[in-house]
Image (cartoon, rainbow, N blue to C red):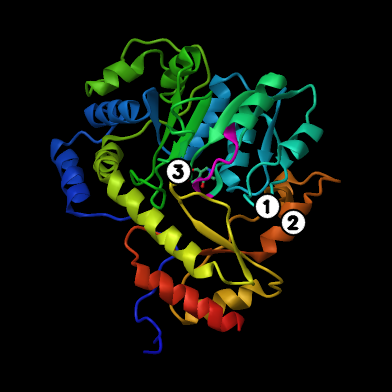
Amino acid sequence: MAHKIKSELIRLSKCSISLDEKKAVNKVLDSEFLGMGPEVNKFEEELSSFFGRKAIATVNGTAALHLALQCANINTNHSVLVPSLTYIASFQSITAAGATPIACDVLEDSLLLDLKDAENKLTNNTKAIMPVHYSGGVGDLSKVYDFAENYNLRVIEDAAHAFGSTYNGKKVGSFGDIACFSFDGIKNITSGEGGVIITDDQKVIKKAMDARLLGVINDSKKRYLGGRSWMFNSKEQGWRYHMSDIMAAIGRVQLKKFPLLLAKRRKLAIHYDKLFSNSNRIITLDRDYNTVVPHIYPIRVKNLNDRENLKEQLLKRNIQVGYHYFPNHWLDYYKESNNHLPVTESVFPELLTLPLHPDLEESDVEYVVSEITKILG
Ligand SMILES: *Cc1c(COP(=O)(O)O)cnc(C)c1O
């Protein structure tokens, strides 16, 4: 049978919420304590056992990155290497810490940070590197750590896309320096908004626990019990970056459901890969879905000169697509003269992100692929 236009919009991304999340939120509402309390404590403990390391929950992933940088002592004297092809949150977190982001190019096959380009951009002020695990892939992460060791850099992993992905059999975040995840509505798991810092570094842990609560020393412990500090001290700049019990309640249910969400995301991405494997126009990302949990499914359409038109035609067929991401070195705030990133600049106009979320079916993926193929002719 010929494909008909689907009657319902196939969304680019969305969260997958069941009755369990609603019940959990209602329970918090019924308690009439909505702030940071016992639910956040339990969510952090569950995340700690997931990663085998300390977890510090935050109000969102950007806040997690900002806190991680600040608590690793990255400041106005420093610059941070980061790929331009990332969500603006990576860059904003660096400037929030007062530091200067150095926009780097990516590798063509993986769209992950190009260490050769990063090496060319090192200065005496470079004190950190922020690899971005685009679409859930981490590439050769040990090379990033070798590079960091060589040049004495902190590594703050922007792992917002990579919740559940593994590297050499270990979960991303369970090893290395500092990893930050996002639990925003469309990420691999959600707590509504939300984020987390995962690290073993005791100094960073101690600082971040206070800095997320306006710098109030040891307030986290009181909050876990549903209280707060009345007589307190503060020695450093902090922010109102803590997570609430409403958010943690959603996150806890999602973490429990994660094996299902992970399996679904992988299955759909593998199906896309298979359907595109014979295409001479469409290039899929270099990802192994035995290890990667895909947050998004971007493709590259070779010689695509009117992406906006393709996007509109797909929307007419009830398929929503996106572009990940508008390069940060093209933004007024982050523009530097003479910083040209050939791969990023040539790849970005041909990138198209296709629908991927746990409530899609393989038949939806087949519909999306067949409509794109038809439009491209
Ligand atoms: C989502 C995301 C973030 C930030 O997370 P929020 O929770 O939205 O603040 C950071 N980096 C990347 C690459 C992201 O996709």
> Residue lying farthest front?
278
Give percent across and percent down for residue 287: 53, 50
In which quarter of the view is residue 218 placed? Answer: top left
User: Could you tell me which residue is drawn at 33 percent across and 43 percent down?
Assistant: 191
Q: CA distance from mark 2 to mark 3?
A: 28 Å
Q: Amino acid at mark 3?
A: Thr
Q: Is there any visible trace of residue 97 in the rendered image?
A: no
Front in this rendered view, residue 176 or 275: 275
Q: Is residue 155 left or right of residue 233?
A: right
Identify the secondary structure beneath mark 3: loop
In the picture, measured across the screen, residue 23 lies left or right of residue 10, that is left
Amino acid type of disc 2?
Glu
Which residue sits at x=29%, y=37%? 248
Q: Where is mark 1, residue-wise?
A: 327
Q: Calculate the distance from the C-alpha at mark 1 to the C-alpha at mark 3.
A: 27 Å
Residue 138 part of the magenta-drawn span: yes
